[in-house]
Image (cartoon, rainbow, N blue to C red):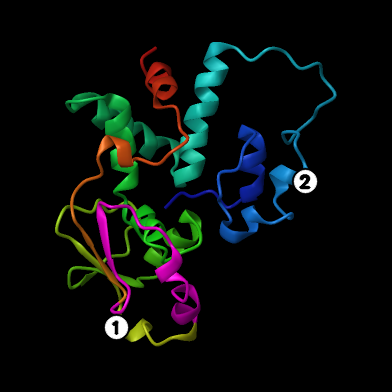
Amino acid sequence: MARYTGPACRRCRRVGEKLFLKGERCYTPKCAVDRRRTPPGDRSMRRRRVSDHGIQLREKQKARYMYGIMEAQFSKYVKQAFTQSESTGQNLIKQLETRLDNVAYRLGFADSRRQARQLVLHGHFLVGDRKTDIPSYTVRPGDVISWKESHKDSEYVKIMTADLPKRPVPEWLELDVANLKATVRRLPSEDELETTIDTRLIVEFYSR
């Protein structure tokens, strides 16, 4: 399975804003975006004005980096969004938001999507009564996501879930803190898609 293994902070610097790829660290003075405002790479050459194509490409890369998706899989999501009704951009974000790794992150089971992906890959979660270790698994209304029973008493899970009551959870998800499980109430509506991504630019990039 292809995945990015390089420095996460380098990607934030590349797009020029925080993507919160390293969880709590992004809120501290150690954040690379706060410490080094310049993008990575050689800066000796004169910088030119970014073209419209460059702006669209940067927004597409920003979405990919934020959700931890490789190019081929992201293109697949975009193609599916074009074939569905309603807004293409909103359809794209819905597909990304209903990935299992993103849902685990939204529920507060992990500090970042990157960490949530690792937890899913290691088989820490159940969807219904079945272990699901596929980060791209698409959750559906009625699905119940929970920690494996054998993992609930581990010190790691206790530390990770200690602050769950204080963390906000999207209204399309229902969290049972006591039992460390959540139910997908429905698909997220347009006004519940909390994202800084300009999907219009991504649609324009793939419409060329």
131 up-or-down from 79: above or below: below
Q: Residue at x 61, y 33 (%)?
A: 15
Determine the image quadrant of residue 28: bottom right
Secondary element at tag 2: helix
Q: Which residue is mark 1?
A: 149
* Image position, residue 23 (x, y; %): 56, 58
Q: What kind of residue is marked 2?
A: Arg
Query: Which quarter shows the C terminus?
Result: top left
* Nearest-to-viewer mark from 2 and 1: 2
Splitting the image into 4 quarters, where does residue 30 fall?
bottom right
Question: Which sits in the foreground, 193 or 201?
Answer: 193
Q: Residue at x 37, y 61 (%)?
A: 107
Residue 114 spot, x, y in % from top left: 49, 56
Residue 65 is covered by the magenta coloring = no
- Residue 190 in the image: state x and y as whole percent: 28, 35
- From the image, tell me which residue sits under label 2: 35
